[in-house]
Image: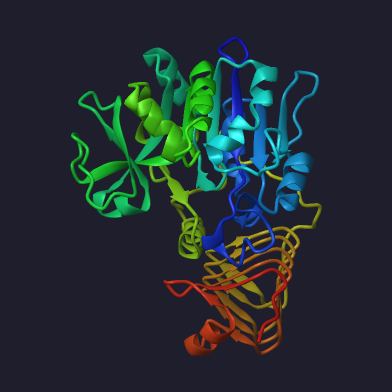
Amino acid sequence: MRGGPSVLGIVLAGGEGKRLMPLTADRAKPAVTFGGSYRLVDFVLSSLVNADILRICVLTQYKSHSLDRHVSTTWRMSSLLGNYVTPVPAQQRLGPRWYLGSADAILQSLNLVHDERPDYIAVFGADHVYRMDPRQMLAQHVENGAGVTVAGIRVPRAEASSFGVIAPGADGVQVESFLEKPADPPGLRDDPGKVFASMGNYLFTTKVLVDALHRDAEDPRSVHDMGGSILPMLTERGMAQVYDFQDNHVPGETPREHGYWRDVGTLDSYYDAHMDLLSDQPAFNLDNRRWPLYTSAHQLPPARFVAGGIANESVVGPGCVIRGQVTRSVLSPGVTVAEGAVVQGSVLHDNVRVGRGAVVRGAVLDKNVDVPPGAAIGVNAERDGSLYTVSANGVIALGKGQVVG
């Protein structure tokens, strides 16, 4: 930040994303397409860049080619000002081993910290959908003199078993304990029906993080994870505080959008987050000119609606040609929907083709899937279950280029 404390951004983007298969069969989870034109990694990078955190390292590992390429070709900053967003693949700097966990990933990349010598380090996850102004979280961290500040979002106690839960003390800020997916955690003092779920976003004072990483590396019992190892360590030492995401206000957001954050780690949550984009006043609006989302520009013509083609309550990307009927769906660039075809409640990635008279309902189709004329997906549950991946809530998913049976 020009004129203020120096902050290095470290984005943890090495996740395998097994629960998002088959979308992650050929790519890292942060590289998965979202919202038509974006990759999941674009959401965290947009928030950091909008907040003037302009030196960012994206740590990658699992099937990272498309992610590395996207970051390298899209996120080009001003070299004149010394700003950058750079992918950093696993390099085995500390011996012949890959990353053992998110903490070990940063430990093996401390050369980046030593080169920059920042005052603070923002360690953020790469696979959530949200907008955030990290400057507000940094302001609390600096004012309180915390070693680490972790962003927490209020969720119902009934959902606590899906998250790491931050238990604050009487002041509502100091972290008393960190509970990993607890069945029955205590509620918040000011809101007993809710708990703080960790968003996986941390702000560290640099020396505190470096010292903690070295301590963790020497512990043979550690899982070397930021949430599972580093945060509990600093909590025990009284150095951890929580930042309430509810207090974060992003320029240009609507009251309906305030506090929106989704972990899209499963097919169902990924699908539901897409449906959040589609109403007249969406729960998450992709179009916020004051806090924009950045991604690569597609050199394609505008979408065309011809031969009576229509789309209702849908996001339609550039280069799409719609001759059939599209309802409550998200279409990435280059999708074609032929005459007589029906697409309902679906997410179609780049260059999907839906043939004449075909039906696609409640499905996620990865790029280059070709739905033949007259084919049906989402019509016969028994048949779909025998041919495709089907989520717990019935979302049908086809991988990149998968043949439609």
Viewed as shown, does residue 59 lie left or right of 103?
right
**Front one among 61 and 357:** 61
**Front one among 231 and 222:** 222
The quadrant of the picture occupied by the C terminus is: bottom right
Viewed as shown, does residue 311 lie left or right of 159?
right
**Residue 356 appears in which quarter of the rendering?**
bottom right
Residue for point 60% across, 37% down: 105
Picture coordinates of residue 108 (x, y %)?
64, 32
**Residue 122 appears in which quarter of the rendering?**
top right
Which residue extends farthest top? Answer: 3
Viewed as shown, does residue 321 lie left or right of 239?
right
**Front one among 174 and 38:** 174
Q: Is residue 359 visible?
A: yes
Counting every numbered tag in the picture gives 0
The quadrant of the picture occupied by the N terminus is: top right
Picture coordinates of residue 295 (x, y %)?
69, 44
Picture coordinates of residue 268 (x, y %)?
46, 64
Coloration of the structure image: rainbow
Picture coordinates of residue 194 (x, y %)?
25, 44
Residue for point 56% across, 11% down: 4
Q: Is residue 306 above or below residue 284?
A: below
**Front one among 182 and 312:** 182
Viewed as shown, does residue 315 lie left or right of 368?
left
Q: Is residue 248 visible?
A: no
Q: Is residue 351 above or below residue 140?
A: below
Which residue extends farthest front? Answer: 220
